[in-house]
Image (spheres, rainbow, N blue to C red):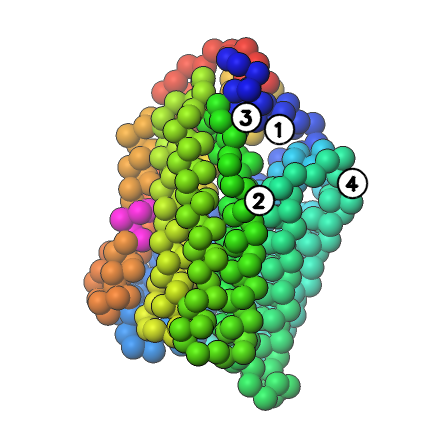
Amino acid sequence: MSARGQSAGGLRPLRLSLGNAPPFDVPARFIALGGTALLAGCVLIAVGADRLVAPGGWDTPEALGITHILALGFVTAIMTGVLYQMLPVILGARPVPARASRLTWWCFLVSTAVFTATLISGHDDLAPIGGIALTLAIAAITAHAVSVMRRATGWNVVAVYIAIAVGCLDAVAVMGAVLAVSLRTGMLADPLSLLAPKILLAVGGWLGLVLVGVSYQVVPLFNVSTVRPRWPRPVLLLLSTGLVLGVVALAADLAPPVRAAALVPYVAGAVLYVTDIVRLTRFRGWPAGPGITPVGEVAAAVVFLLTALVALPAAAGMQPWPQVTVTSALLGWAPLAISANGARIFPFLAWTRAGVPGAAPLAANRIPIRAGVGQLALLGLGWLLLEAGFLTRSGAAARTGGLLLLLGALAFPALIALALGGRRFRWAPLGPFTR
């Protein structure tokens, strides 16, 4: 392999992967919480599908609770676990002491459970307590990220993505706490005016930027790409510009066409991002194979672009596009991206932690391709049926979509267990790709 191919393939992060990483239980706690929350959210969607797709169904305690279970318990928990593992690696920094990280997990777990329980039960009187506690837990997550960044020995564009994304997460947490308190106390004259900007910062800011940024780190690495991404900085600029313009347009309650136009830069950034992901997965180097990872990475990028497109009518206030946008993020490209990349990183971490020599080349396929693509198909078809249910007001379609998403979520840990069992594949040392 040429030197150019090795550099683009991401060997430097692979060498650093475990030297600066925290104890395995730290990210594993958050990731396990995220998987559990995804299962719970899918079950609740299947049970309450008829009510959720009905006119006004999005503005019910049940819908609010499910949304926050998925946004906080699923996506935020998993991406926090990823950042606990990844930030010290890509920045070359010592991790924060594990005791503080474990305490943060407990705070996040309890506050998320309290907050979502108050929402889904309709007990608004307790929502301010949960909202404030959750804000403090997210502040602790931010403090961890800042501490690692202060110890950094080197920065790259991925770290900038993550820094902006964490800033959006903080803004969302503060706005959510203010909204919960104001709805109870009347502190703000019109607290619901915070809702649309908060949703955009959560979906397009925190979730969008962190997943795009992490993708620019792991996609070249997992595919041993022989080319470099072309557009990470323009994508960051376009996504950030569209995000700022969209928040301003929504907060100022500008005319619907103006609100939609404000997000056009975000869509342009999503287009460039898709072209980068397709290119990086197309030019795979040895020993990367087809497998679940490149298929899922491309699928997630395409759904990300589709979500950005449907955000235009959502910003204009056209129903039911806001629900479609939010659920496409939480149950569309987020599960696809997490499954695709987790299929490589979870076995890698488990094998290398166990000290098995020659067993953990990061680019190796460990999951049968038919089983892996089948799991992605369950997630993709479930997402499509769920959105069809919202668009056609069909409870049956939404329920079927929720059940397929549930099956896809259950299949993923089974595939990881298969990979770790080692009964399907035998791995041999792969030279520089072996730890």
Looking at the image, tell me whether mark 3 or mark 1 is earlier in sequence order: 3
Looking at the image, tell me whether mark 2 or mark 1 is earlier in sequence order: 1
Q: Is residue 318 left or right of residue 88?
A: left
Q: Which residue is mark 4?
A: 151
Q: Which residue is mark 2?
A: 233
380 inside magenta stretch: yes
x, y percent for residue 288: 43, 22
* Nearer to us in this view, 273 or 22: 273
> Residue at (26%, 66%) from the top-left corner?
391
80 inside magenta stretch: no
x, y percent for residue 212: 51, 46
**Badge 3 density bin: few <14, some 14–19, many ≥20, Cα 10 Å:** many
Range of the magenta residues? 379-383
Determine the residue located farthest toward the right in the rendered image. Answer: 151
Looking at the image, tell me whether mark 4 or mark 2 is earlier in sequence order: 4
Helix, strand or loop at mark 4: loop
**Badge 2 density bin: few <14, some 14–19, many ≥20, Cα 10 Å:** some
**Badge 4 density bin: few <14, some 14–19, many ≥20, Cα 10 Å:** some
> Residue at (42%, 68%) from the top-left corner?
260
Which circle, 2 or 1, is nearer the viewer?
Answer: 2
Q: Is residue 77 left or right of residue 334?
A: right
x, y percent for residue 13: 62, 28
Amino acid at the residue labelled 2: Arg
Amino acid at the residue labelled 1: Pro
Q: Quadrant of the C terminus?
A: top right
